[in-house]
Amino acid sequence: MTKRFIRYSLKRTSLTAGLTIACTALNTQGASAAAAESGASPDHHGVKAHHRIKKHSSVRPASQPAAVAPAVSAAGTTVAQPLNTSKNTTFISPKSNEEYLTVHGQGMNILHEDMGFSRMPQDVMHTAQTVNVVPKLLMEQQNVKSLDEALRNVPGITASVGEGEGGMSGDQFLIRGFQAQNDIYENGLRDFGVYTRDSFYYDHVTVIKGPSSEVFGNGTTGGAINIVTKMPHLGNSYSDGFSGGSGQYYRGTVDVNQQIGETTAIRFTGMGNENNVVGRDSVYSHRWGIDPSIAFGLGRPTTLTIEYFHQTDNRIPDYGIPVITKPGTTIGRPATQFGLNRNNWYGTNYDQDASNVDMLTAHLKHEMNSHISFFDDLRGGKYDRYFSASQPGCTGSCVTDFFTDPEAAQINRRGHLGGPEPYQQDDWSVQNVFSMVAKFNTGSIKHQVIAGWDVSHIYDRRTNYAYNFNGQNGTQADTTSLLNPSAYQPGLLLGSLGQYSGNLVNISGVGHALYKTGSATDAGAFLSDQVWFTPWFSATAGFRWDNWNSHYSANGGTAGSGVSYGQNQTMFNPTVKLMYTPNDDTMIYFNWAQSTTPLGLYVTNSSEPLKAGTQGFKPERSSLYEIGAKYNAFHGRMGFTVSAFRLEKGNAMQTDSNGDVSSSSDRQRNQGFELSASGEILRNWNVIATYAYYDAKTVASLTAADVGKRIQYAPKNSATFWTTYTIAPSKPWNLTFGGGLTWRNGVWLDAANTQRVPSTVEWDAMISHSFLKHWKVAMNGYNLANRLNYGSLFSDRVTPSVGRSFLFNISASY
């Protein structure tokens, strides 16, 4: 591998050391053979023995405490009480003496999944909004290793490379064509970090589509992504796994849950991962992570869970390949569509994305009685990151040479404004959410009231570095061959702190700043009331009030640099929902909701959130109108959903390829419908399928030519499909096989619809075999057709997706 210049040391831990840390917690005790024979671990959110079906009441606001307190997970999910906690993990029903293995969820049927936090206490079936779920069973079958891989199972989500001078990478998602990089949550609390998230500690992932500010606060124009993590539970379980395959892929995971006493349990999950990216030269990731947690008071009215998360990642950022317009045509396309090698990487030896993430979280739940419950969630986060990336730009003579004399074509690695400069990012955040859920009657009318407050603060500090360019903003070219790029740039030097400060990127209204500091405080209060007028008809009305106070400053560097801006805005976001539930298995609903996105919301993952000309911008305002239906069929084995929506966004802000934010008072509209089917078609045959149709357009703009054009990044059609079948599941010759498709129409990359990326079509497959009761071997194949697809997108560059690859896995569960 090419020798690299490393400025910032993360005290990098090797894969071996990372796995050693994880595996020291693994206690290979025996456990129930029944769990292995059923194909589920004791906490597996997928399959119940004997296909025992959990019923849901359409008129019960939330689960009531049982007369005999059952065992629960730390998240508050009721599970069966353990018969004993030695070798066996046999469980006994709290309502009878029947022994069986009970877990929350129903395999692939997403309607039985919980939302994962107190402010949305219902399951997916009784949540009046479009919700996509990536269940645990699906992630296991696909051997999902990151949040990005998990979300490929959700239609309407696209990934972005980053924005202009800010150089942001990490997880940058869009939902229904609208930015969602600040709308990633864990157990209902916002994850402010900018990093690539590994999925080793995920239980399942939910995507709530459409404006949801009444629940989450500012943002959520397209929706919110909520990660539900693995929590301690009563009973013991132990599992580990190792994967290896294409691209020198090596990965190990461990998951240990140990009950201590009657009401306490600890859980430890860990991961070590090293891999190159198939189909991309010089791009790799070396990372490890741990997520220990402890829960007190399980099965009691008061439960306290403390969780610590750490992830270290050292990777090479990949800004992909340029989008170019062939002479004589008007539509720009990725250069690889014209024959450029998909493996080409245009970085230098200085490129690096090295991050350390630490989050400490406490979840407190107290059931005062059967009517009132209190929740308090507190998280502190610390995010350290050194980021240096090359941004390929091919314009003018580069394009001309590519089509006339390809060997002479040179690409500029500094891109716009001299390119994203290297920087050290040091961030911290704190958030506290207190909520109360109260259930009561006023005469014959039932109520469920949810009220509370949400206070958060985020601080971002960046120290910028410059290259040894001559002259303001870099007149010395940093170029390489478009056809045969080299990571070595003769004479290119990265300066120390303050060195070459005149070559720092010059941002209009900011200058050549050495230090950039952003901070924001959000104080919000929320209230909602769901009212059952009859057992089959209910309505919810709610709102959230927020005060957003943000600041941004830039100083140091050359003379004249030094600015400071601030804003204080107050937002009010209401919602109204109507629900018709004629029986336990059917719901028809209407949802109207609004959300607000103030400028400067993206404190940690934007370049210059505030400037002299932007600090007075009004916030973006979005409204959702949605009707839909959800249905549990075949005694709860299958779940079906359908929804039609119209999403309107006003005061739209846009970030161009230079990183400049503009507010054109544009109005954008996305309307369409979504479908899903999930569950067990027949015994041992599981399926999950989704489809989305979007008619997304700009309906008003000061740029007349943009009116009627499609919204960038919003595909007209997208769909996902995955199915598996198990032969003889309890026999020595058992075999599970399956596969699926991910499909997305081509999308436009700019508001003017002059740059476009083609469709994505990816076929994947898997096969697995269980043996010796506790062991399993599996093989996954990805992008079997080796099609040239594109994952991360931006206005003038795209990143090719992983080529054909295979991954072998062996795992054990006790």
Image (spheres, rainbow, N blue to C red):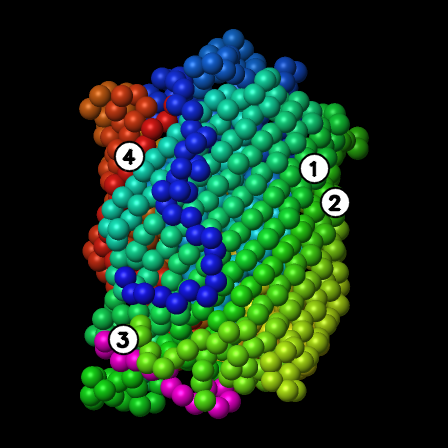
When the figure is inspected, residue 689 is found, relative to residue 499, above or below; the finding is: above
Q: Residue at x 61, y 36 (%)?
A: 306
Residue 475 is one of the magenta-drawn residues: yes
Q: How many marks?
A: 4
* Residue in the foreground of this view, choosing between 183 and 5: 5
Determine crowd level at label 1: few under 14, some 14-19, many 20+ residues with C-alpha closer than 10 A: many
Q: Earlier in the sequence, mark 4 or mark 1?
A: 1
Instruction: Please state which amino acid type lies under the numbered disc 4.
Output: Ile
Q: Residue at x 67, y 51 (%)?
A: 430
Q: Which residue is mark 3?
A: 485
Question: Element under label 3?
Answer: loop
Query: Residue 375: which disc?
Result: 1
Prevailing secondary structure of the magenta residues: loop
* Residue in the foreground of this view, choosing between 637 and 327: 327
Question: Element under label 2?
Answer: strand
**Contact, mark 2 vs mark 4 (Cβ under 8 Å):** no
